[in-house]
Image (cartoon, rainbow, N blue to C red):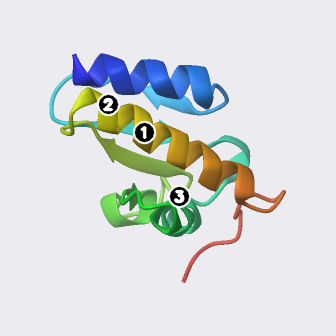
Amino acid sequence: QRHEVLARALAERLPEWRVHPCHAGWSLWVQLPGGASGDVFASAALGQGVALLGGRATSPDEEFLDHVRLCFSAPADLLVEAVERLARAWEAMPAERGSAVAV
């Protein structure tokens, strides 16, 4: 149920994000549009009070730098609030959406 709440909130609020279906576990693997850096976005999200992992932290070969991992273990109302905060962080990022590689 929490998976569905998070996926639905992302589809409604951030429809340009590509959400990969979750077949097991407690997180969604999400591709940011336009080659945006998941690490740069993770930093912006933390500024809005949402902690998440950028693709660099979960990929040994740096193939998924434009991805983030979103955990859905929190209660449904917190997941919806987290998506609102993620949307604010996304909207506040510069036009290049953090496409530079974070070091």
Residue at 73%, 45% in the rendered image = 34
Residue 21 in the image: state x and y as whole percent: 36, 22
Q: Is residue 80 above or below residue 95?
A: above
Bin the neighbour count of mark 1 within 10 Å (Cα to Cα): few under 14, some 14-19, many 20 and up.
Answer: some
Q: Amino acid at mark 2?
A: Asp
Q: What quarter of the picture does the N terminus occupy?
A: top left
Residue 77: quadrant of the picture: top left
Q: Are marks 2 and 1 in contact (CB under 8 Å)?
A: yes
Residue 89 in the image: state x and y as whole percent: 61, 55
User: Nearest the camera: 98 or 7?
Assistant: 7
**Relative to residue 99, is residue 83 drawn left or right?**
left
Residue named by callout 1: 81
**Relative to residue 54, is residue 73 drawn left or right?**
left
Residue named by callout 2: 77
Residue 36 in the image: state x and y as whole percent: 66, 54
Q: Nearer the viewer, mark 3 or mark 1?
A: 1
Q: Secondary structure at mark 1?
A: helix
Which of the two discs, 3 and 1, labels the residue nearer the N terminus?
3
Q: Distance of mark 2 from mark 1, alpha carbons?
A: 6 Å
Bin the neighbour count of mark 2 within 10 Å (Cα to Cα): few under 14, some 14-19, many 20 and up.
Answer: few
Q: Nearer the viewer, mark 3 or mark 2?
A: 2
Q: What quarter of the picture does the C terminus occupy?
A: bottom right
Q: Which mark is residue 63?
A: none
**Relative to residue 86, is residue 50 drawn left or right?**
left
Residue 28 in the image: state x and y as whole percent: 34, 35
Residue named by callout 3: 38
Residue at 42%, 43% in the rendered image = 82
Bin the neighbour count of mark 3 within 10 Å (Cα to Cα): few under 14, some 14-19, many 20 and up.
Answer: many
Q: Distance of mark 3 from mark 1, alpha carbons?
A: 20 Å
**Relative to residue 13, is residue 56 drawn left or right?**
left
Q: Amino acid at mark 1?
A: Glu
